Amino acid sequence: METALVLCEAAFNRTGGKTAAGLVRHSLRFKIVGILDSTLAGKDAGEVLDGKHAGIPIFSSVTDALRKLEKKPDYLVIGVATIGGMLPKAFRPAVREALKNGVNVISGLHEWLALDPEFSELARKRKLTITDIRKEPPLEKMHYYRNLASKMDAVRIPVLGTDAAIGKRTTAVILTKALNERRIKTSFVATGQTGLLQGSKFGVPIDAIRGDYVVGELENAIQMAYETERPKVIMVEGQGALSHPAYVTGSRTIVTASQPNAVVLQHAPARKWRTYHETELRLPNGTIEREMELIKVFAGAPVIGVTINHSGMTREQVAEKAKEYEQRYSIPACDVLWDGPDKIVDAIIDRFFPEKRKRR
């Protein structure tokens, strides 16, 4: 695996730092050797994120990291998902310092760093690469909608949510792993920058694809997973929310491309405002009831489990909410990070693979 530092200045363990969080929790491509966030320097990234030691130190700067690491990392990864996908101005010195010290750069932002005159010149002089992954394929290689999902015999389950940046990808990855551990072959399809940076074998950055092709491109990625691995289940990462006014292509694209057999719904009970200029627009967070209504209309598939984002909550509060949701909606509810995914996995197995059901 290639080694990487993840740049997340003043954003680690915050909403905007979800790419860095995702890479700390799961990465098939990179061995993460450190996080860059001067506000948390000296701490362990896993302990900050989940209260579990991960052996990934947090450094104050590129210089600090290069001085303390035994070996220079291969890459500096941009570890934030900003609204609009622009590189924060405060990140430029770190990117510059990485390139000056011979470290390649990879980014999932809409702003293509390889086209930045300063960065590209530094990379050229030192024979380094700057890779922007949030790109669509050349026009002649893109795919139009072909109604492929209707011909698949694999169960297709997107993890949708009541808001953006709420943990949909993390839940989908955990469920994928858990189903495979139960010997139900499951593939994961990424739909955004973090999943692709984590090394997902299948996926496209759907918010970078032009409208005429976005459903077809995602449908093609799902088809590639189906043809390559012949899974019994295909988990699809959600984006935004059907009810979120700022992300109109995300979840709608995903349900159209995947034609779900079932949906897992992620919700953050303690989140008051939607993740989108919270202090300016103050859009009320989505509700489970409203999202279920929209899922019924757009997806035509049942919600078979609610997964909880515990941000701002205690374990006792999460347990109370899970019990409340189970009584109200008659489906399992849990926090897959704190409680594990067994409740949701059991629901999937009971519905689609009863012959694999655990003896109770």
Image (tube, helix red, strand yellow):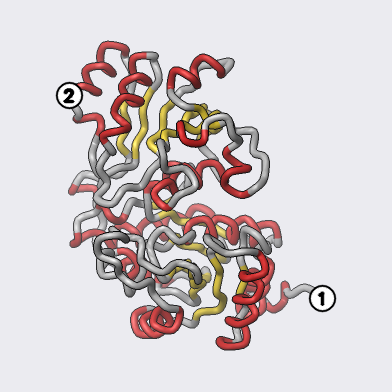
Q: What element does badge 2 sit on?
A: helix
Residue 67: image location, x then y, percent = 51, 14
Separation of residues labelled 2 and 1 (CA atoms): 62 Å
* Residue in the picture at 40% in, 74% down: 259
Nearest to viewer (mark 2 / mark 1): 2
Residue 234: x and y in percent read 51, 63
Q: Within 10 angstroms of label 1, few (less than 14), some, or many (20 or more) residues?
A: few
Pointer 2 with pointer 1, Cβ within 8 A:
no
Image point 49% across, 72% down: which residue?
265
Q: Nearer the viewer, residue 233 or 320?
A: 320
Q: Amino acid at mark 1?
A: Arg
Please indicate whether residue 73 sits to the left or right of residue 180 in the image: left
Q: Inspect the image, locate mark 2, and give the three-letter code of the amino acid beneath it.
A: Pro
Q: In terms of image quadrants, where is residue 279?
A: bottom left
- The image position of residue 297, as x and y in percent, is 35, 85
- Position in image of residue 13 (x %, y %): 49, 47
Between 244 and 341, the residue placed more toward the observer is: 244
Q: Quadrant of residue 207?
A: bottom left
User: Circle 2 is placed at which residue position?
Assistant: 117
Question: Does dot 1 land on a helix, a strand or a loop?
Answer: loop
In this orientation, does residue 202 appear?
yes
Q: Residue furthest top?
A: 125
Q: Earlier in the sequence, mark 2 or mark 1?
A: 2
Please name the residue that numbered disc 1 is placed on: 359
Query: Looking at the image, which residue is at 25% across and 65% down?
Result: 281
**Position of 70 relative to 231 (above/below):** above
Position of the C terminus, as image quadrant, is bottom right
Using a 10 Å C-alpha cutoff, classify the residue at mark 2 as few (fewer than 14 neighbours), some (14 to 19) or many (20 or more): few
